[in-house]
């Protein structure tokens, strides 16, 4: 029975270590997306044109 308590304690400690590492990574900007906004501005006009073309087609019918 004491082995279960030891394993439970170790697993909680490991979980806390991973949680702290995740929080530190988020605060340091590890998950910031700097690529997508630069690509989005290149294809934004095409998306707007597609939307207007579809509205024009539906209005003609």
Image (cartoon, rainbow, N blue to C red):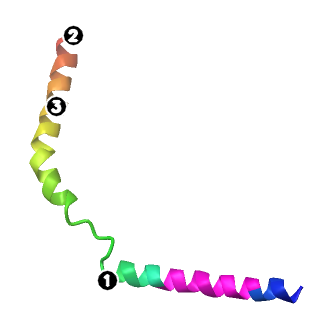
**In the rendered image, which quarter is residue 36 located in?**
bottom left
Q: Quadrant of the N terminus?
A: bottom right
Tell me: residue 3, above or below residue 53: below
Q: Which residues are magenta?
A: 7-20
Relative side of 49 to 22, left or right:
left
Say which of marks 3 and 1 sits in front: 1
Please give the residue where the numbered disc 2 appears in the rendered image: 61
The crowding category of the residue bearing disc 2, from other C-alpha atoms within 10 Å (few below 14, some 14 to 19, many at least 20), is: few
Tell me: residue 54, above or below residue 22: above
Mark-to-mark CA distance, 3 and 1: 38 Å
Q: Residue furthest front?
A: 3
**Which circle's residue, 2 or 1, is located before the other in the chain?**
1
Q: Residue furthest right?
A: 1
**Which circle's residue, 3 or 1, is located before the other in the chain?**
1
Helix, strand or loop: magenta stretch: helix
Marks 3 and 1: CB-CB under 8 Å?
no
Q: Position of residue 6 (x, y in %)?
A: 77, 89
Q: Position of residue 11 (x, y in %)?
A: 67, 82
Tell me: residue 49, above or below residue 61: below
Marks 2 and 1: CB-CB under 8 Å?
no
Residue 50: numbered disc: 3
Please give the residue where the numbered disc 1 appears in the rendered image: 28
The crowding category of the residue bearing disc 3, from other C-alpha atoms within 10 Å (few below 14, some 14 to 19, many at least 20), is: few
**Residue at position x 17%, y 38% in the image:** 47
Mark-to-mark CA distance, 2 and 1: 53 Å
**Element type where label 3 sits in the image:** helix
Say which of marks 3 and 2 sits in front: 3
Relative side of 26 to 13, left or right:
left
Q: Position of residue 60 (x, y in %)?
A: 17, 13
């Amino acid at each position: 029975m004491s082995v279960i308590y030891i394993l439970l304690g170790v697993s909680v400690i490991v979980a806390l270590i991973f949680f702290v590492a995740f929080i530190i990574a988020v605060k340091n900007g590890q998950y910031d997306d700097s690529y997508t906004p630069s690509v989005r501005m290149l294809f934004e006009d095409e998306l707007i044109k597609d939307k207007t073309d579809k509205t024009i087609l539906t209005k003609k019918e």
